[in-house]
Amino acid sequence: MKVTFPHLGTMHIFCKAIAETSGIPYIVPPETSRRTLTLGVQNSNECICLPFKVILGNFIEALKMGADTIVMVGSGPPCRLGLYDLVQKVILEDMGLRFRWLTIPPRLTWQAIWKNYEETKELKKELSWRNILLFPYGLRMGWKKMMACETLEKLAMTIRPREVQQGETQKRLKKALSGVDEAKTLRTLHEALERGKALLQETEQDFTRVPLKIAIVGELYTVMDPHINRGVEQKLGELGAEVTRTSWFSTHILRSLRKNKADQNSERIRFFEASKAYLGYDVGAECNLSIGEAIVRSQEGYDGVVHLMPFACMPETTASGILTRVGKDWDIPILTLILDEQEIEGRIQTLLEAFVEMLQWKRKAA
Amino acid sequence: MEEKGRIGIPRALMFYRYFPLWKVFFEELGWRVIVSDGLGKRGNLIYFEDSCLPMKLLITHSMDLKEKVNYLFVPRLVSLHRHNIMCPKFRGAPDIVRLATDGSISILDETIDNRTKEDSMSRSFLKTSKRLGADDKEGKRAFQKAEQFFLNFQKGWEKRINGFTSKQLFQIDVPIPEEEKERPLRVAFVGHPYNLYDTDVNKDILSFARSLGMRIITPEGLSEKEIDSQVSDLSKEIYWSSGREIVGSLFHFLSGGVDGVVFLTSFKCGIDALLQEFIRRRLKVRGGASIPFLVLTLDEHSGREGLTTRLEAFKDVMEEMKKAPNPKHQNPNKFQ
């Protein structure tokens, strides 16, 4: 048995840690590349959203490398993500690939357990007691690593706009992240995190700069994965903007576990409340939050908002329509980037440069 | 009864299923119902958001009505079935219309969510009637009458669709004419109601199909059971009611009983894009009856000529298949 999982930002570090610690054989799909995307595009149709294509590409590559068990997070209505597994299974089957599929249900319902029961029974045979006993420890390890990654990424976001040598922070972040990835025990992980933090803080910085403040909002997959959004976060940072986002892997896990209501969720509730002036109902996914966050950020004095969505994403299409009006009403520039498989890295760079320049002009005029 | 005012219903989206119900309801309450005109030859589409064509048409039709009526009726359709939901875009539709019309008109946008309560539909209409100044009793009576009328209307649907031109489909008062002649081909047309019956979306393909000698069959004629039996064994439930209906009826028709199946879809429709891939792959994996299957993707740029060419070719295929006593191709033919 060889387990595999899709890429999503630094999620592979989380999954890898779980599998490694509990001794389950695994294969990390190759880093999302042009080839991944091409494989995904060839085997789906044009109006399916980009995350579908990338995840499909990840799976195809991993299966060809010898993986045989796919673990995929599930989701509920109304977004299409909830039916990815149904369609991807048929596509992989049609391609003649052999695999087993395990969906982690977003909420534990009877239906979810029933549908997964057969597959889990099969898997149990191959797992030893050692694997099962170590699994909780693996989860803890994975979670700690996840939090460590997020701490480092958040730190990098504040350092990037002040770096003297462009690209330095990114280099150091990469090194720090791989340090976290390689840690085997909780103690070495802690050391790796501290080392990573120090490494980032040592970046030569120009503290006289007053960076622009930009919030990234939108569909979670495009916000979280730098391969999908072509490094919007890094690009904005290197153009001299301090970037914030509220979509993190841990946010969504905690949300679906309905934990931590006071902390992370209160922010989400605040965004949701703010969106009510424009949207009278929960449209689903991140739609309301994108709108709400844009409003709240404008009140907080942010300079601009970048809204990311995959082409033909159902909830975010509604959001993008409303956001044009929000931008006018609240006097905050909003740039919507619609992402698909096209080679648009250059175009995004130009758009972001123009956007940042415009924000700087706006700041000077005020 | 004295006329209280005018209510505008945009000729878009679920208009193409529920219009009879809506019309009778408002007329019972003493309001006049005004329906927007089609796009016409000029075809001036208003782009408010970058959505699918049916959604753009909703905005366009609402803009057309906004000066002519007292209220605009754009219900917030969250769910129309016990366990299934509508497309997420429908949830924001009234808000989008409100922004597009700059809040210059009051919108009747009560939520219909059958997941929470079985009778959410009648509750929502009661709320609407209250907003229009009617009391509970009047509202209830009007809804019952409307519902009764709607059920009767749906029974005559297949006759209606084969007797009328697409433009006349929702002319409620006109009696249904008898079919002029026997049509040799039985063809199922599947898709969202607003793709099937909106001539601005499909360039009146149904009338053309009839002129080619096709008898049209639509999913409306299938019972819930027939649809359920096709989708109940899937590894995951399709939670959109329209998607469920489409997949269920496609599998039903593709398993026999018709000469061909046409699937009409809008470009950028998220539900159709995903399910279309599912249907195509599943047919390939599972095999099955060899019934010709045509997928037509529509948007505001599709020309009538393109569609007619495809349909004519499809007709030839169906006729060939009919002639051959033992079809050699065991795999279903697909044209994309």
Image: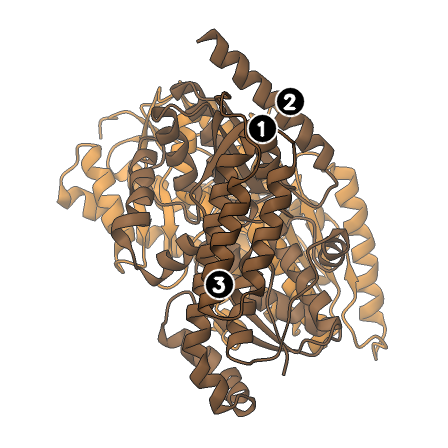
Chain colours: A brown, B orange
- In space, the residues marked 2 and 3 are separated at their CA atoms by 66 Å
Counting from the top left corner in percent of width and height, residue A48 is at 63, 52
SS class, disc 2:
loop
Mark 3 residue type: Leu
Q: Residue at 54% x, 74% y: name it.
A: A19
Residue B131 vs A252, above or below: the answer is above
Q: Residue at 48% x, 68% y: name it.
A: B237
- In space, the residues marked 1 and 2 are separated at their CA atoms by 7 Å
For this rendering, which residue is in front, B294 or B136? Answer: B294
Q: Name the residue under label 1.
A: B39
Q: Which chain carries label 3?
A: A
Q: In this view, does A190 lie to the left or right of A35?
A: left
User: In the rendered structure, are the residues bearing label 1 and label 2 in contact, judged by CB atoms less than 8 Å apart?
Assistant: yes
Residue B189 vs B19, above or below: the answer is below
Q: Name the residue under label 2.
A: B42
The number of numbered badges drawn on the structure is 3
Q: Mark 2 lies on which chain?
A: B
Between marks 3 and 1 in the image, the one whose residue lies nearer the viewer: 3
Label 1 neighbour load within 10 Å: few <14, some 14-19, many 20+: some
Q: Residue at 38% x, 47% y: name it.
A: B77
Mark 2 residue type: Arg
Q: Name the residue under label 3.
A: A189
Mark 1 residue type: Leu
Counting from the top left corner in percent of width and height, residue A7 is at 60, 59
Counting from the top left corner in percent of width and height, residue A217 is at 47, 38
Residue found at the far top of this picture: A365
- In space, the residues marked 3 and 1 are separated at their CA atoms by 64 Å
